[in-house]
Image: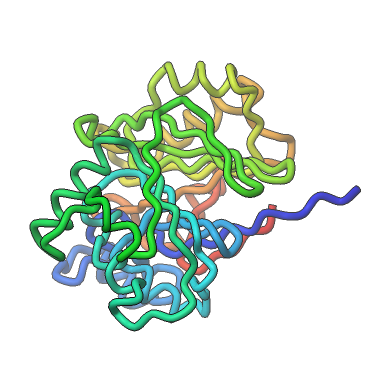
Amino acid sequence: MHKKEMIVTFLGTAAANAFPEAFCKCNNCEQARLLGGFSLRKRSSLLVNDDLIIDLNPDIMAASQIHGCSLTNVSHCLQTHPHADHLDLSHLLSRSPDYGTIGAPVLNFYASVQTLQRASETFERDLAGYSLLHPGAESRLNLKIHQIEPLQPFTFENYRVTGFPANHAPEMGALLYSVESNGRAIFYGTDTAALFEETWQAFHQYQMLFDLVILDHTYGPNQSGSDHLSAHQVIEHAQRMRHEGLLKRSARVFATHIAHEGNPAHPELVEFASQNGYEIAYDGLVLEI
């Protein structure tokens, strides 16, 4: 029996300040402006099929328009963490009936307790004057909040999801996610520095076998990683995944969350990646796995 494919759409592939950075005249930004096309990157977010989004970031409205990618069926959101380049809480207002939105399904919003607490405080202080965790907030916002724990798989509809602790903003409970559906599995690993050993152990504990791995690529080929992964760390992570049997034979590894400081424009970065066993995502890229 043929298994239904999982469709993945990259709504954005840049780090926090997009690429090119609008105020920057560095060589990478100038080259990206000159080339346009795949070298123009919005901040990182991912759509799985048409109903699951990872990160409600500030650029998803533009991404939907530019790439002809409707978000009207999105009923689940996996939030990695509450940093502003990954979470724009105004979307929770704009998609609500109070703002004239018609026909949007209830949004199931999944995040760690730390992310939910920070998001709720920000929402109350800056946007609405009431907390996301207030008893009436979910009804008013057409929202259902789910507090999730790292390394505790959970299911909804045809998905099985596991959150893994990110090596990033620990006080905010940042998470990375595996998403499994119909025999397919993806790993979305941004923002993070080198994966924790407990994450590698959990991959094996849950017998993960990925069709698609998407890794943070904030720092470029001539930089070392620190609070985020570098190009050479992406190579090392991909090699370890293959060596430890975590990737299917046909699996693909893509880079996202690409910053302008150390990464060249798209064509040059693609050439580097192709020589080192992985691929470079671009905004609007659609993969069927």
Q: Position of residue 98 (x, y in %)?
A: 29, 77
Task: Please tell me which residue is depicted at 30% across the width and 67% down the height of the picture.
Answer: 91
Visible in this render: residue 150? Answer: yes
Q: Is residue 114 left or right of residue 181?
A: left
Visible in this render: residue 260? Answer: no
Count of numbered marks? 0
Task: Please tell me which residue is depicted at 27% across the width and 58% down the height of the picture.
Answer: 137
User: Would you place residue 175 above or below residue 204 in this image?
Assistant: below
Q: Is residue 97 left or right of residue 21?
A: right
Q: Position of residue 76 (x, y in %)?
A: 48, 55
User: Would you place residue 179 above or below residue 284 in this image?
Assistant: above
Q: Residue furthest left?
A: 125
Q: Residue furthest front?
A: 135
Q: Position of residue 219 (x, y in %)?
A: 31, 44
Q: Position of residue 54 (x, y in %)?
A: 44, 53
Task: Please tell me which residue is depicted at 22% across the width and 66% down the height of the picture.
Answer: 21
Pick the residue in front: 75 or 182: 75
Pick the residue in front: 143 or 210: 143
Task: Please tell me which residue is depicted at 19% across the width and 31% down the height of the picture.
Answer: 171
Colour pattern: rainbow
User: Would you place residue 57 above or below residue 64 in this image?
Assistant: above
Pick the residue in front: 130 or 149: 130
User: Would you place residue 202 above or below residue 161 in this image?
Assistant: above
Quadrant in the picture for residue 114: top left
Q: Is residue 84 left or right of residue 229?
A: left
Pick the residue in front: 35 or 155: 155
